[in-house]
Amino acid sequence: KWGQVKQDLLNTVGKNNFANWIEPLELARIADGVATFDVPTSFVGNYVSQKYGDQILYHLRGISPEIRRIAFEVPARPARAPRPAPASAPKPANGRAERESMIAAAPLDPKFTFDTFVVGKPNELAHAAAKRVAEGGPVTFNPLFLYGGVGLGKTHLMHAIAWELQQNHPALTVLYLSAEQFMYRFVQALRDRKMMDFKEMFRSVDVLMVDDVQFIAGKESTQEEFFHTFNALVDGGKQIIISGDRAPGEIEKLEERIKSRLQCGLVVDLHPTNYELRLGILQSKVDFYRVQYPDLVLADGVLEFLAHRIRKNVRVLEGALTRLFAFASLVGHEITLELTQDCLADVLRASERQVTVEEIQRQVSDHYNIRLSDLVGPKRTRVFARPRQVAMYLCKQMTSRSLPDIGRRFGGRDHTTVMHGVKRIEELRASDGQIAEDLDLLRRTLEG
Ligand code: ADP
Ligand code: MG
């Protein structure tokens, strides 16, 4: 049975993922509706469960519907206890338990790996730098400083580095935490008079990752300690990776000497996403949802619509998609543009300036060099009809107007006329390079 499920999984997860994660799984037993797998470490168990749990369960149930749940277990093997993830405790024998509790780093999100990170123009440099550091070779950039706006993938990349380092170099002690947690530990150590332990612990790691460093701006004693930790590690040839919401030089109330230290290595920024990247991210998420909701049908144009309309923050974009799928699975509908607009009305409203129907009409008539009155007028010759359909299509894609509403604004046309126009342009976009180019240009101009 498991053999057959494996075969199915091979087709859905791809060869590499299969070899890394699925192949090594051993089905230990099925009891009380729970299928339990043996895994070599709890890291593998967590990862597989997060990433492939749904798919495994789905395929298993195809064969044995009585299975309700899957579980992962590390078989008792006294000689090779799994290391605590994400950070492993430093070696010295005395005081070890205490330091282990102090090291309690932020947990790593199993979804934040390089596998799930979609690369595009805006983030390719940051991605390449992160990849390089994650190889764990000789320290080349120190520190690596990643910065960018909210929700652009800084934390995702940092976790991905940590996961990869742990995979490739299990002997390295990797410590990931936010600047806020750094401060918290520091204050706690001061209060409990454990500064020696604190210093020793931070200075004993091989790789230190501090997320959202802007948090310690203005916090003087924390900055001081951070500075010393930083120097001690760099002098010891240890890798440091820091993220911030802006370039080091622009973080207010951060000590000059820290700024200049942060600038010594490689500073790379994550640029705001572009349309292609947003679409790519949505597509990769949808592949994941298709497994979870195998019966849902996603209409053409929905992802494009979302990628157009939600531009700022990838987290919001992802949240919107999650909600859309959950909603559609409840009401059992096909995910259409209509449903999308309904279900996500508040998100769409909140996501910045709307392009108006009037702006689209003006832009399109300019572009095709026809009069606005002809664009919305009754003439049905191709020179007017085609631009009109383009404008209707853009209204459908870029505004939250309904079809009847758009029809009204095009000289009182019927909603079926609008629908026909939108369909026609969708077809042409795929077959006619000129139209595709026109649409692209118009969209860019309208988005400003
Ligand atoms: P930041 O730390 O920069 O505020 P996060 O790393 O927390 O942002 O990213 C926010 C969300 O967006 C996360 O769920 C993350 O997985 C997702 N995300 C951001 N960029 C990408 C990308 N390029 N590919 C896939 N997911 C991304
Ligand atoms: Mg973050």
Image: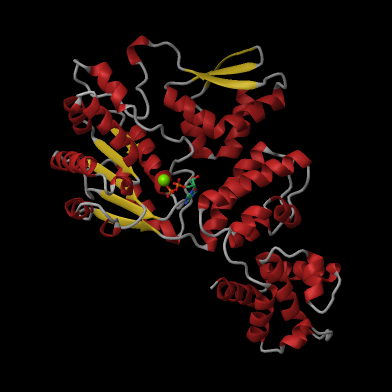
Measured from the top left, where is residue 228 in percent x and y? Answer: 16, 40
Residue 226 horizontal side relative to residue 20, left or right: left
Closer to us: 104 or 191? 191
Closer to us: 157 or 231? 231
- Can you tell which quarter of the image residue 357 is in? bottom right
- Can you tell which quarter of the image residue 30 is in? top right
Residue 142 horizontal side relative to residue 301, left or right: left
- Can you tell which quarter of the image residue 370 is in? bottom right
Measured from the top left, where is residue 283 in percent x and y? Answer: 59, 51
At 63% from the left and 33% from the top, the residue drawn is: 8
Measured from the top left, where is residue 226 in percent x and y? Answer: 22, 41
Looking at the rendered image, the quarter that the N terminus falls into is top right
At 31% from the left and 22% from the top, the residue drawn is: 101
At 62% from the left and 48% from the top, the residue drawn is: 321
Residue 179 visible in rendering? yes
Is 308 rendered above or below residue 139? below
Closer to us: 148 or 303? 148
Measured from the top left, where is residue 359 in percent x and y? Answer: 65, 77
Residue extending furthest toward the left: 235
Is 195 rendered above or below residue 347? above
